[in-house]
Image: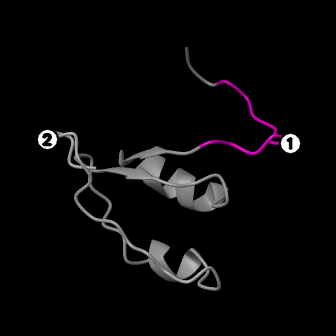
Amino acid sequence: MNVVEAVPKMVWFTPATTHDHVLISKLKMDPKIIYVFDKGYNDYKAFQKFCNHQTGFVTRIKDNAVFESVEN
């Protein structure tokens, strides 16, 4: 998402057989970028990397996810 314009800047469409990890390494870590992932993509190590680089992301967690609130 382009934060300033609030519209998608880049969209990748792949066959269902393409694993998301193939694309994740191509993403730029930038605080001005917000990435949007579908519920099927669930990589907590990648999400931590985004947090460490202050890069925004949005996803829905899976129904059976275990989490801990670290800040309100």
Q: Which mark is residue 23?
A: none
Query: What predominant SS class does the magenta segment belong to?
Result: loop
Residue stretch in magenta = 60-69
Neighbor class of circle 2 (other Cα within 10 Å; few <14, some 14-19, many 20+) is few
41 in relation to 32, above or below: below
* Residue at (26, 55) in percent of width and height: 30
Answer with left or right where residue 41 lies relative to residue 10. Answer: right
* Residue at (30, 66) in percent of width and height: 28
Depth check: give the residue in front, 69 or 65.
65
50 in relation to 68, above or below: below
SS at circle 1: loop
Q: Position of residue 72 (x, y in %)?
A: 55, 14
Q: Position of residue 1 (x, y in %)?
A: 28, 50
Q: CA distance from mark 2 to mark 1?
A: 34 Å
* Residue at (38, 73) in percent of width and height: 12
Q: Position of residue 2 (x, y in %)?
A: 20, 48
Q: Amino acid at mark 2?
A: Glu
The residue under label 2 is 5
The residue under label 1 is 64
